[in-house]
Amino acid sequence: MRMPIIFGNWKMNKRIEEAQALARGIAAEAPTDRIEVGIAPPFTALQAVSEVLKESRVHLAAQNVHWEMKGAHTGEISPEFVVDSGCDYAIIGHSERRQQFGETNNTVNRKLKSSFSVGLSAILCVGETLEEREGGRTEELVESQVRKCLDRLTRGDITKLVIAYEPIWAIGTGRTAAPEQAQQVHQFIRSIVEDLYGRETSSNLRIQYGGSVKPENAFSLMREADIDGFLVGGASLELESFIQILGKSLEAMPE
Ligand code: PGA
């Protein structure tokens, strides 16, 4: 049985006090005994939020890291720095980083390696554009992302990896992939990981869905066999909707 994993990706939102207040609410209300719950505040709030989360089981993630540990990289953040700030996870290769900041499968691969080398777990984001989906190229694109991003990672690394399938056309648009549509890609991703690392590793891998997850669609998505949780953007910015998503997910889980 895979432990479901649901993280909130706050993107470029929440100043320190707001971040602490929201984190406090999540720490108090999230059902962390049955779901692995985490949040990814902006870098500037990590340390302050980690203080709030200290006594809780809520995980703390960075939204990005650099692939080097230190050096002349003005404006960048080392994986070691986010560990210092209390993180145990990093989100790597989010489509907004790929589209707005030119991240490639190659830099994503390097970021995964540097994150694992300092003991971070990682959430690797993959997903196709609308044009690619309409052109029938979803599997081709996702397969190439998964294979390139995992290049030369060890089986041990994969135990620290979560993959988030986030169709770009569903992010922040209110358009969600239909549960069967998402399930199909999740199953496909698992089959690629099986091909690379074998059955045991692939069946233990958790695959999140991301893209307009809301309290209204969490239940039906979570019922799918290969959907192991969510990476939630917009709906993770309000305590009520995030907690509702966790609640709906619990309802969808077998007893
Ligand atoms: P969304 O974002 O839930 O606002 O669509 C998801 C994500 O980008 O991780």
Image: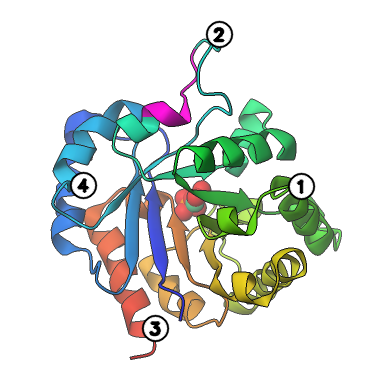
Tell me residue 10's x, y (percent): 38, 42
Badge 3 residue CB within 8 Å of ligand 1: no
Tell me residue 133's x, y (percent): 78, 59
Bounds of the magenta segment = 75-81
Q: Residue at x 39, y 55 (%)?
A: 7
Tell me the residue that label 1 is attached to.
Answer: 148
Tell me the residue that label 3 is attached to.
Answer: 252
Measured in 3D between alpha carbons, the distance from the residue under mark 2 to the one under mark 4, in whole angstroms, is 33 Å
Tell me the residue that label 4 is attached to.
Answer: 23
Tell me residue 228's x, y (percent): 49, 71
Residue lying farthest to the bottom in this orientation: 255
At label 1, the amino acid type is: Lys
Give the position of the N terminus as an image quadrant. Answer: bottom left
Verify whether residue 76 appears in magenta. Answer: yes
At label 3, the amino acid type is: Ala
- Marks 4 & 3, CB-CB < 8 Å contact: no
Marked residue nearer the N-terminal end (4 or 1): 4
Left or right placement of residue 19 versus residue 202 in this view? left
Tag shown at residue 72: 2
Q: Nearer the viewer, residue 157 or 43?
A: 157
